[in-house]
Image (cartoon, rainbow, N blue to C red):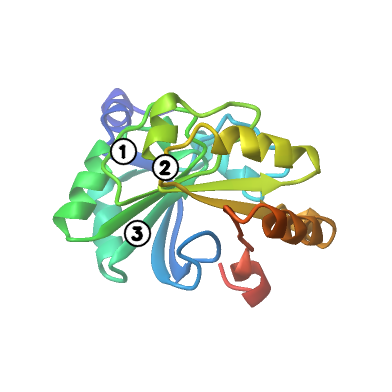
Amino acid sequence: MLSKETQLAVEKGEMLPLMEEFYTIQGEGFHTGTAAYFIRIGGCDVGCHWCDVKESWNAELHPPTATDTIVDNAAKYADTVVVTGGEPLTWDMSVLTKKLKDKNLKVHIETSGAYPVSGRWDWFCLSPKKTKLPVPEAYALAHELKVIIYNKHDFIFAEEQAAKVNSNAILFLQPEWSKKEEMTPLIVDYVMQNPKWRVSLQTHKYLNIP
């Protein structure tokens, strides 16, 4: 049970339920192949059945950590930070992003967009989920739309989402890892027939890095 003081700090974004943090090579989407420091925030109720970090869902498993500590750790390693989850927008990201920017870091987010947007972002990767669709502001802010393809119906969902994002958003289709052998050829064919889309692969899993 959190103390009232800690609970208040979490609500303000001065502390966040930190699941893990690590320096690695970005594995998917527009920035594939570039170095970045990942901050994974616990807590998510979007509930994707194929989620590969289900241990992130329960925020209570991940102790509230001072935002200053998170920022200081990130600044030691990289000039680009990726905030992911879980679902980071479950929490107020204003304090975290301000402090990261005060260190002259570029700040990216990977989000389902299911919650109101907080924080200031240099790159907004929107990965919408059918179970809890993005808020309108997330579609407007998206630099990148990344749709996970688990079955053939997901191509229809992808087009529905592409119709909602701003006209500058870069569009990606990414096979769900457990279905990659089945879905990757379909994605390749689809992108060739619909070249507004690009293929995204989870290259970090092929490289066996975090």
Viewer-nearest of labels 1 and 2?
Answer: 2
Q: CA distance from mark 3 to mark 2?
A: 17 Å
The amino acid beneath tag 2 is: Ala
Left or right, residue 85 beside residue 47 = left
- Residue at the farthest right position: 182
Residue 56 spot, x, y in % from top left: 56, 43
Q: Earlier in the sequence, mark 1 or mark 2?
A: 1
Q: Could you tell me which residue is drawn at 48 percent across and 61 percent down?
A: 30
Q: Which residue is mark 2?
A: 142
Q: Nearer the viewer, residue 144 or 39?
A: 144
Q: Which residue is mark 3?
A: 81
Q: Nearer the viewer, residue 115 or 44?
A: 115
Q: Could you tell me which residue is drawn at 36 percent across and 53 percent down?
A: 108
Q: CA distance from mark 3 to mark 1?
A: 13 Å
Displayed quadrant of residue 192: bottom right
Left or right, residue 62 beside residue 5 = right
Compared with 87, 27 (above or below) is: below
Viewer-nearest of labels 3 and 2?
Answer: 2
Image quadrant in which the N terminus is located: top left
Tell me if label 3 and label 2 are in contact, CB under 8 Å. no
Q: Which residue is mark 1?
A: 93
Tell me if label 3 and label 1 are in contact, CB under 8 Å. no
* Secondary element at image label 1: loop
Residue 173 spot, x, y in % from top left: 64, 52
The amino acid beneath tag 3 is: Val
Q: Could you tell me which residue is drawn at 65 percent across and 68 percent down?
A: 205
**Callout 2 environment at 10 Å: few (<14), some (14 to 19), or many (20+)?**
many
